């Protein structure tokens, strides 16, 4: 237990340094502002979907196109997308409805249909539950001034829309996920992208075989970055932070979502996932203090871990410019839940996504024997 706590202190110290380093990074100066096509795959009426989609249309950028993709005529998101298009008649917005199109990864099937309508050579993909400011395109596109850059991705800040489960989800994204990414990319480019932003040059996308090359993978965002880097391009983590609107209906839904992420991460980074429990030292410190019966060493370790944990919490809050965050008293419960999800993620190979149960193999690919069925 003492060794686990010591390793946890070391991790938290490095994580705090990584967050502070990220906070101090300057935003690159804007360049020539090449044309951008934003692909927005949409499925279902996510919380505040209309406002999220509108944020990608209100951009202080000279030349961009937004392509919305919906896969079913009866998807309730269809009406919301049409409202967005009607709201901005002066912009280059269009809807691609690929009714019934499905192969492997449903998001990739959607993107493949949308890509045929893309006009520009910088392709941005962002999930429907993300929201951005008017400077988003300018900030992220500036990263492509380096001709070696083939793809750019962004961290995302969890913004809770209220409720116990949503607060816990936001804490996981901000206090655990984001610092772990910054630790993993210390001193090197990332080897992955995130669904918050998958920005890619058309030539780099063509070099990997386009979006169909991702169809067999559940972690399409991770694989896009990996494949682009394998083709000799750089993948860059932008300084810009996207907002992820979090609205979890309850603890069961939260657990299902986080278990899906855990099993997906395990499938693509098994070694890293195996040791990721070290990012949850607080439960070990609490257990150590309990079994040590008031030992000064145990209480000192607990105090150190609590101090570092709070320091990371507030450092992320500053770096992500979040004036309102979930209460800090949730942190012990959040870390215990995170450790439990990590343990559950060690087992099983089936995840629930949209209306489908999908089996993934040891390489993170959607299993050929996976039975895709409506839930």
Image (tube, grey):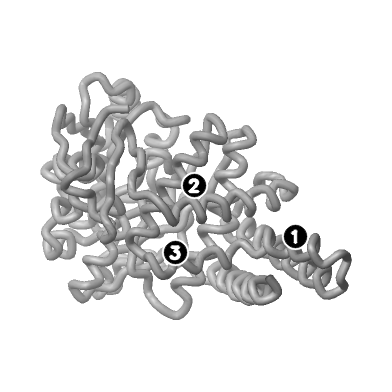
Q: In the image, is 312 to the left or to the right of 202?
A: right
Label placed on residue 243? 2
**Where is mark 1, residue-wise?**
286
Q: Residues within 10 Å of mark 1 (few under 14, many from 20)?
A: many
Q: Quadrant of the N terminus?
A: bottom right
Snapshot quadrant of residue 272: bottom left
Q: Is residue 359 visible?
A: yes
Q: Position of residue 198 (x, y in %)?
A: 31, 55
Q: Out of 348 and 171, give the one closest to the viewer.
A: 348
Nearer the observer, 275 or 306: 275
Can you tell which of label 3 and label 2 is closer to the viewer? 3
Pick the quarter of the image with the C terminus.
Answer: top left
Instruction: Measuring from the top left, give residue 122's x and y in whole percent.
Output: 23, 56
281 w.r.t. 131: above or below: below
Q: Callout 3: 10 Å neighbours few (<14), some, many (20+)?
A: some
| x and y, in percent, of residue 374 in the image | 27, 28
* x and y, in percent, of residue 32 in the image: 28, 64
Q: Earlier in the sequence, mark 1 or mark 2?
A: 2
Q: Check whether the beta carbons of the residues at disc 3 and disc 2 lie within 8 A of each other.
A: no
Relative vertical location of residue 195 with respect to residue 190 in this rendering, above or below: above
Up/down of 95 relative to 347, above or below: above
Alpha-carbon distance for marks 1 and 3? 23 Å
Q: Which residue is mark 3?
A: 273
Marked residue nearer the N-terminal end (3 or 2): 2
What kind of element bears circle 1? helix
């Amino acid at each position: 237990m003492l060794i686990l706590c010591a390793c946890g202190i070391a991790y938290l110290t490095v994580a705090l340094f990584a967050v502070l380093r990220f906070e101090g990074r300057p935003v690159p100066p804007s360049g020539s502002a090449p044309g951008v096509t934003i692909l927005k795959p949409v499925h279902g009426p996510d919380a505040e979907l209309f406002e999220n989609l509108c944020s990608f249309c209100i951009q202080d950028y000279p030349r961009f196109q937004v392509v919305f993709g919906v896969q079913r005529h009866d998807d309730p998101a269809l009406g919301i997308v049409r409202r967005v298009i009607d709201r901005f008649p002066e912009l280059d917005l269009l809807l691609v409805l690929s009714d019934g199109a499905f192969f492997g990864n449903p998001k990739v099937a959607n993107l493949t249909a949308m890509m045929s309508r893309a006009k520009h050579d910088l392709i941005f993909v962002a999930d429907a539950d993300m929201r951005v400011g008017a400077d988003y395109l300018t900030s992220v596109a500036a990263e492509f001034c380096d001709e070696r850059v083939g793809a750019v991705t962004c961290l995302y800040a969890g913004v809770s829309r209220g409720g116990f489960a949503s607060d816990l989800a936001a804490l996981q994204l901000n206090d655990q996920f984001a610092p772990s990414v910054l630790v993993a990319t210390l001193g090197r480019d990332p080897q992955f992208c995130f669904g918050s932003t998958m920005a890619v040059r058309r030539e780099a996308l063509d070099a990997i075989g386009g979006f169909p090359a991702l169809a067999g993978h559940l972690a399409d965002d991770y694989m896009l970055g990996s494949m682009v880097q394998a083709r000799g391009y750089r993948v860059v983590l932008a300084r810009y932070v996207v907002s992820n609107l979090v609205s979890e209906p309850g603890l069961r839904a939260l657990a299902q979502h986080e278990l899906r992420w855990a099993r997906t991460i395990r499938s693509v980074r098994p070694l890293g996932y195996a040791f990721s429990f070290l990012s949850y030292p607080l439960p070990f410190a609490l257990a150590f203090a309990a079994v040590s019966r008031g030992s000064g060493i145990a209480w000192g370790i607990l105090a150190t871990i609590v101090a570092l944990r709070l320091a990371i919490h507030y450092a992320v809050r500053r770096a992500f410019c979040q004036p309102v965050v979930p209460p800090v008293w949730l942190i012990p419960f959040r870390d215990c839940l995170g450790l439990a999800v990590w343990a559950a993620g060690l087992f099983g190979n089936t995840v629930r996504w949209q209306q489908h149960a999908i089996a993934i193999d040891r390489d993170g690919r959607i299993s050929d024997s996976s039975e895709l069925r409506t839930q």
